[in-house]
Image (cartoon, rainbow, N blue to C red):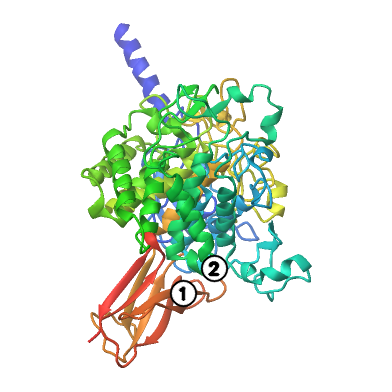
Amino acid sequence: MKTFLILLASVIASSSLTFAQPKSKPFVNQAGYNLNEAKRFVCWGAPDGTTFSIIYAKDSLNKVGKPVYQGTIKNFSGDFSNFNPKGETKEFCIEVKAFGRSVPFWIADHLMEKVSSKLAYEFFIDVRGGNSPNVLPSNITGGGPSRDGGAQTLEPLFEGLLYASNPALFDRWKKGLRYYGDIMYPVYFPDENAPDTDLNEFFERNFAEKRAMPDLVKLLLWHTQFAYKHYKWNGKAGGAYESWQDYKSVRMYGYEGQQLQEFDYQNLLDYLAASCAFYHYFLKDYMIPAEYQKYRKVCLDNWEAYDRQKEVRYWVKSFKWIDDGYREFNEQGSAFGQGLFRNMMMYLCELNETDGQPDKFLKYAQDCAADIVKNWNFNNPWHTWSMRNAEHITPQALALFYIIAPEKCPAGTREKLEAYSNYLKKQMDNPWHYRKHNDTVWAHTKSKEIGTVAGMGGIAFATAAAIKDPKLRELGWSQVNNVFGLNPSGCHLSSKSTERVALGGYWEGVEKGWPFWYKWGTGELGLCRGTLDGSPTNHAFPFNPDSAALGDSPGVYGTEGWAISNRAWMSTVTFSTLGSHAVDIRDSNNKPITEVKAGATVTFELRAALNQDWGKAEKGWILVYEGDNPPKRIVVTETGPNTGIFTAKYTLTTNAHGKIKASYGYMFFEKCTSLPII
């Protein structure tokens, strides 16, 4: 009898693993997948070896044709990375018999960047605390330029990185922000092809030069102006918090034993440092030199007084239940790696000044990097997932420093990044490729993880680019998929509200958004384009569909986005291009060459995320350097609708000498190639 009971228990246990699993339709990235990048889906409950088919989505007669691709499921997931139908504009879906079909999705050239790039910065247009950079922190919830962001959101840094990653794309959009005096208003659904006009507005007539700027650059400069106006502000932060009688017991800023602040104005120097660095690479075309020198002087005069020379610890005093006490690092105040970011920016700025101090700031940056190499502990939750929205700062700062100056990084930098890559791979070894916290906890047990999830793709892309790790880049695309619905809720992390769709503020191709929408909330994000609203909390994993998309519940804060969450997402959009952009020089017949003669004609080829309209051949530009001459901006044209390849013919001068160089992108993102001129 005992033997029978043991055998019966074994059968029951085996059956529960195979047949009692909750079942789902195939969950996919609802928008779709980039060509020539990793692609996968999850079909929970499907046994290993189950066949899946990719078919064209339903036509008007609700019919489908034969499968265009087939594969098998393993560990509840299927991989179709080698399915790359070029130039296809029809949608596909995945079918698994007995489990159903997925929602439709595209597979296309730089699809994620196509549907995400504009929304990434439009969110930060909409979440501003006012249309004037002069608005006082006491009038804005949290005090910073973005509502409820405080001075922690670092908008100029990440807006500048976004522009540097793909400048020809962002140069297209110039009419979404307009100046009226010193005020900058958003314009919804602007006609980018309309003539540049002041619309007969008296106060706009003196701002034609500003109107011609890319919207992303206008936004960056607006945030820089805000930082300059308020870098001395040591008063209260305002907005919704004013009605909280116990506001001072929520979060304060400063060191233990010293008088605390209500607003961490010191971080505004980080804003200015980023803009000073960008000035030398692309902002000099848009920023008045005298303005730049004002920003630079503020940084130089206050750097050490504001503790900008180091990684700042114990800056936030929190009484909030989610992070009570002084924490070594925090998603507010100063995140681990923020010191490296700001000193790296000042180093790049001063490197280009005749009276600059690059060595001083390089030493500061090296000290910050050494701090990370020595002390960054992946098993310390306050260095990783407990920092939530700011977790992405640490690896991205170290990775970018290694990309731009590997020979100047402290010993052990590459090894630290490799160790971090191994940590991610281990924690993501599950069907969702979700970065688990440990063997028993998947996600934060008390709070949302929107920024952690949204920024994880940017973490993987930046780290993979630094150490040339293709497997980690593949995992980066799984994190993008997570945002777009490949998670236990099956929902995109942004609510698809009627209002947001009406504003043009939602991702094309996404059917099912996050089910909870905080129209106002602390940050008033309901009417902000591209807002991320929520993410599955711990009780959703590994697959609990009934609770995967809950709102707030006892002991769990699971809904409402934050400006810092969207900053993390912006980093993912930004760093995705690190592994996909390329520039090449060929002969006039588009054949490979290793050298070029003076006076000869060559073909420049650019592959970049510029493919926004599948119905027409679009344009971009590259920079061309001929010998020691200043660079020329050369227009490149897509070889046909929806090819994603941009080319231009160029004839060298007859007396050219040295090298011919073609480049695209700035700073960390520059892709370039050069050939000797003979």
Q: Residues within 10 Å of mark 1 (few under 14, many from 20)?
A: many
Q: Seen in the image, is 626 located left or right of residue 276?
A: left
Residue 171 coordinates in the image, percent (x, y): 54, 68
Res 656 → quadrant: bottom left
Q: Residue at x 45, y 60 (%)?
A: 278
Q: Is residue 96 visible?
A: no
Q: Seen in the image, is 648 located left or right of residue 209?
A: left
Is 137 rendered above or below residue 64? Answer: above
Disc 1, SS = strand
Disc 2, SS = loop
Is 497 rendered above or below residue 646? Answer: above
Q: Residue at x 32, y 78 (%)?
A: 585
116 and 245: which is toward the camera: 245
Residue furthest left in the image: 411
532 and 317: which is toward the camera: 317
Q: Which quadrant: the C terminus?
A: bottom left
Q: Amino acid at mark 2?
A: Asp
Between the C-alphas of marks 2 and 1, the distance is 10 Å
Residue 642 coordinates in the image, percent (x, y): 50, 71
Contact (CB < 8 A) between labels 2 and 1?
Answer: yes
Q: Residue at x 55, y 56 (%)?
A: 220
Res 244 → quadrant: top right
Mark 2 or mark 1: name the one nearer the start of the chain. 2
Q: Amino acid at mark 1?
A: Trp
Q: Which quadrant: the N terminus?
A: top left
Residue 315 coordinates in the image, percent (x, y): 46, 31
485 and 261: which is toward the camera: 261
What label sits on residue 621 in the rendered view?
1
What label sits on residue 171 in the rendered view?
2
Q: Seen in the image, is 508 located left or right of residue 460?
A: right
